[in-house]
Amino acid sequence: MSYDLLLALTLFAFVSSITPGPNNLMLMASGANFGFRRTLPHLLGVGIGFTLMIVLVGVGLVQVFDLYPISHQILKLVSVIYLLWLAWKIANAATPEGDVQSEGTPITFIQAALFQWVNPKAWTMALTAISAYTPDQTLYYVSLVALVFGIVNLPSVSLWTVLGEQMARFLTSAARLRAFNWAMAGLLVLSLYPVVLG
């Protein structure tokens, strides 16, 4: 891979990882509700799960869509239903008065890793990365793309968790936390518009 292509890939990985999307909104909400330490499994599940997704997409999983076009429509439907369910969970995650960051349970490592497979933004990122930044879809280039994303993605999404944790300083009442959670749930639902309209 040429230096220019590697630089372009790194920039794409950074921009696509740092911008708002389902993963980042959920991590910010989790950071605000549970703190960084309790959100760490969720955070690692996103980073490692997405890196593995790139490898599997790159070595041929994407061909399933070509062979069975209905599978793409099924994936979209499952994605929308699951994200709406997650939005409902986020909206109802507010804790009792005076008990911020204690009630409820954050998303686990496995749940976060599996979530990548129904995350529309993750699919877009993975498909673009493989189609645009691999000169050929050999295991070497696919692994290189996955490695770049693994290095860039984890610190990028960590910032959203830290931001959420810092916001918890201002979310000191159940009413404020509830309003924040409803706002995050609303943004998560809005993130579905490209999937629904696409």
Image: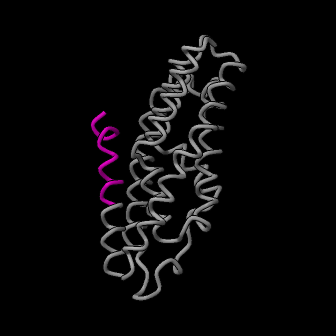
Residue 61 in the magenta stretch? The answer is no
**Left or right position of 158 against 69:** right
Quadrant location, the C terminus:
top left
The quadrant where residue 173 appears: bottom left
Residue 193 in the magenta stretch? The answer is yes
Q: Nearer the viewer, residue 154 or 116?
A: 154
**Left or right position of 12 against 146:** left
Q: Position of residue 180 (x, y in %)?
A: 33, 68
Please name the residue shown 43% across and 88% down the image. Answer: 98
Q: Position of residue 86 (x, y in %)?
A: 43, 60
**Left or right position of 52 against 96:** right
Q: Position of residue 193 (x, y in %)?
A: 29, 43
Q: Position of residue 12 (x, y in %)?
A: 48, 28
Quadrant location, the N terminus:
top right
Please name the residue shown 62% across and 30% down the image. Answer: 148
Q: Nearer the viewer, residue 143 or 10?
A: 10
Main SS class of the magenta portion in the image: helix
Q: Nearer the viewer, residue 71 or 95?
A: 95
Give the residues drawn in magenta, as a range.
185-198
The quadrant where residue 96 appears: bottom left
